[in-house]
Amino acid sequence: MLPEKDITKLKYILYARKSSEAEDRQVASIESQVEVMREIASQLGIKVIDVMTESHSGFKIGRPVFNKMLERIAGGEADAILTWKLSRLSRNPDDAGRIMGLLQRGEIKHIRTSDRNWCPDDNVMMMYVEFGVTNQFSRDLSADTKRGLLKKAERGWCPYTTLPLGYVHSPFKKLGEEEVVPDINQFALITKGLKMVAEKRMAPREVLEYLNKKGFRTKKGKRVGMSVWYRMLTNPFYYGIFEFPTGSGKWYEGKHQKAINELEFDEIQEFLGRKDRPRPQKHNFAYSGLIKCEECGSSIIAQYRKKVQKNGNVHEYTYYGCRRKKGPCGQPYAEQAKLEEQLMAVLSTIKISKDFHEWAVDELKLEQQKEISERSHNQALTRSRYDEVTKRVDTLVEGYISGSIPEEIYKKKLDESEKEKKMLKLMLDNVDHRMDEWIQKAEEVLDFAKNARDRYENGKEPVRKEIASYLGANLFLGSEKLRIVLKKPLESISENAEELNGIMEVYKPLKETMKRAEYHALVAQNPKMGPRTPEF
């Protein structure tokens, strides 16, 4: 941390930002950010030359006010930044890199947030972590949602927002209870209608007319049309299975209450002239839903093939190829075994040694302790100030009641004190523990890099799918070659793993002669093991 005398000499720009998008839904308003940071500036004697605010997503490059601020700093007009959180400065790796570069070169001499300081001579590993949080946050919203939907499907519950007529999502479910339940107003009627068609008691159109007279309605309360009824008659959901995602070829056994059995469904298809249509196959393909076509961007789907030779030997194959949903596409299918060979090659590039894993985890914990210490110190100062203001309010009230303080002065001073108290309360309530969570995330990434290749090589399909999903959201297949855009931490490890593992081998002979902390401190002195390498 910079000495107080140095802080007072710097010229700060107070920067506040808020987006209307999901990334900032829980973030304090721009006005609140400015108020809190002005209070901190007042406490520390910080000179604010300007307040710059904007309403733009930090995940997108090209924010005009942000760019203008950096131009003013580069031009010497300012040399420090005051902002509520680092996430206000950036949620994308490009702008985060600009900030870290300016800080490391000393062009930015100090960044002060509501809970800590960032200086040019700091170990910037923690800044990598925090910017890693902001950069990954928006991506994680989407990835977490998809992962949650997939987990729901794997549990046997259809994850689509809109369910087939006759079913609703349980509004009051508890853990372990049914998540999809029959619509009490429609289910019995639909079941009766489907069975009537299966038993060939009436033609489908006649059954629909009968149901509509009995109160059969869409979810919008309208009479059900023939096209909707036909889709229901051909929907395997009613006998207990569903496809997720749509068009993936991946089918799940549902836990929802069945309207008809599989035999009745077959009878309906025969009645409709669909007896020989291909039936859904409940194969659990390892990589369905994870890969996109390199050429056209459509989803890559799996196909199962069984080949029986004349001698009776049976060979089973799984191929992956473009769904061609977006139009003609010339990409060939690739055998699963070839994809897995390529995945193994990628996993080999991120494998880190046990020694490097231990060193990196220890470094992260050291930085975490520094961050916790500074956060606690700042919280103690704010708590002390809050208590002082509370006493001041009590004194004002006592003076007003006793008549020693005139009403005009009382109201003015009370308003000022309550406003200050409100700002300090906001600072106290906003103890940001996300850094602790992302230290755990960084350890998780290191654990993954250490063990993923061996787990993949020895694991079955569910383990292999989990590992492939973790590598990154962008997997592409083209000309039977798999291209993986690794998530940022793994990309950094992949670029540096071989060199880092080699450095650890050089130091390894000293490991047995020194205490762990001394040994890791010695390794940290190597310039190539500095904070710019493990980019979390």
Image (spheres, rainbow, N blue to C red):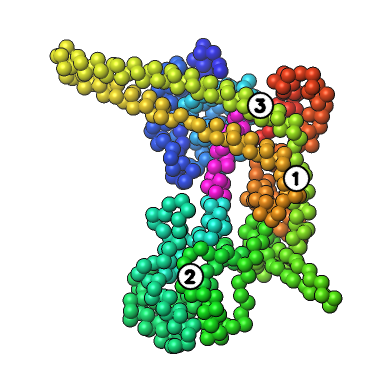
Q: CA distance from mark 3 to mark 1?
A: 25 Å
For the residue labelled by badge 3, is the local secondary structure a helix, a strand or a loop?
helix
Structural crowding at the residue carrying mark 3, measured as other residues with C-alpha within 10 Å and reported as few (<14), some (14–19) or many (≥20)? some
**Mark 3 vs mark 1: in front:** 1
Q: Position of residue 490 (x, y in %)?
A: 68, 41
For the residue labelled by badge 1, is the local secondary structure a helix, a strand or a loop?
helix
Residue placed under numbered mark 1 in the picture: 454
Residue at image position (45%, 80%) is: 195
Magenta region, mostly helix, strand or loop? helix
Q: Nearer the viewer, residue 336 or 82?
A: 336
Residue at image position (55%, 38%) is: 134
Q: Amino acid at mark 2?
A: Lys
Pick the quarter of the image with the N terminus: top right
Q: Amino acid at mark 3?
A: Glu
Q: Residue furthest right?
A: 311
For the residue labelled by badge 2, is the local secondary structure a helix, a strand or a loop?
loop
Q: CA distance from mark 2 to mark 1?
A: 42 Å
| Residue 283 visible in the shown view | yes
Q: Position of residue 373 (x, y in %)?
A: 53, 21
